[in-house]
Amino acid sequence: MTDQQQVTEIFTDGVGQNRFSNGVIRLDLVSASDIGGPEDDDGAATVTHRLILSPQGFIRTVQTMSLLMNQLLEAGIIQRTPEAAAEENPAPKKGRASAGRKTTTKS
């Protein structure tokens, strides 16, 4: 791809549902009015786009997003929540796996 080639840009406020089926990962991209918890089942959600990835592409995407998240944390744009800090530095327990990172944007 060259700099002269036009690239379609898509804005999304986040990922709605995601699923793995028939060897591919499907991530539904949603707008702000669609973001909510599992209790938000009013049927008003509108998927704006769907990202379909191979498992290898998904792994590369997660790695890229992880690097970006670390850059945002270092720049102070987002901050780890107290829950995320506790999860990343838990009291020593046998057999406990980390549940992942939780972050919040700076207000």
Image (cartoon, rainbow, N blue to C red):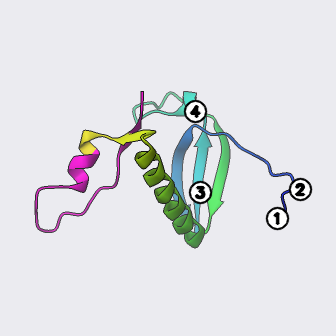
The residue carrying mark 2 is: 4
Instruction: Give 52 or 98, whichever is nearer the viewer.
Output: 98
In the image: residue 48, left or right of residue 99: right
Please report contact status of discs 4 and 2: CB closer than 8 Å, yes or no. Answer: no
Dominant secondary structure (helix, strand or loop) of the stretch shown in magenta: loop
Q: Which residues are magenta?
A: 84-107
Q: Which mark is residue 45?
A: 4
- Judged from the image, the secondary structure of the residue bearing numbered disc 4 is loop
Residue at x-position 45% and y-position 30%: 40
Q: Amino acid at mark 3?
A: Arg
Q: Which mark is residue 34?
A: none
Looking at the image, is mark 1 or mark 3 earlier in the sequence?
A: 1
Q: Nearer the viewer, mark 2 or mark 3?
A: 2
Please report contact status of discs 3 and 4: CB closer than 8 Å, yes or no. Answer: no
Q: Nearer the viewer, mark 1 or mark 3?
A: 1
The residue carrying mark 3 is: 26
Q: Pinpoint residue 100: horizontal percent, then vertical percent.
A: 33, 55
Q: Amino acid at mark 4?
A: Ala
Looking at the image, is mark 3 or mark 4 earlier in the sequence?
A: 3
Q: Nearer the viewer, mark 4 or mark 2?
A: 2
Residue 27 makes an appearance in the image: yes
Looking at the image, is mark 2 or mark 3 earlier in the sequence?
A: 2
Q: Amino acid at mark 1?
A: Met
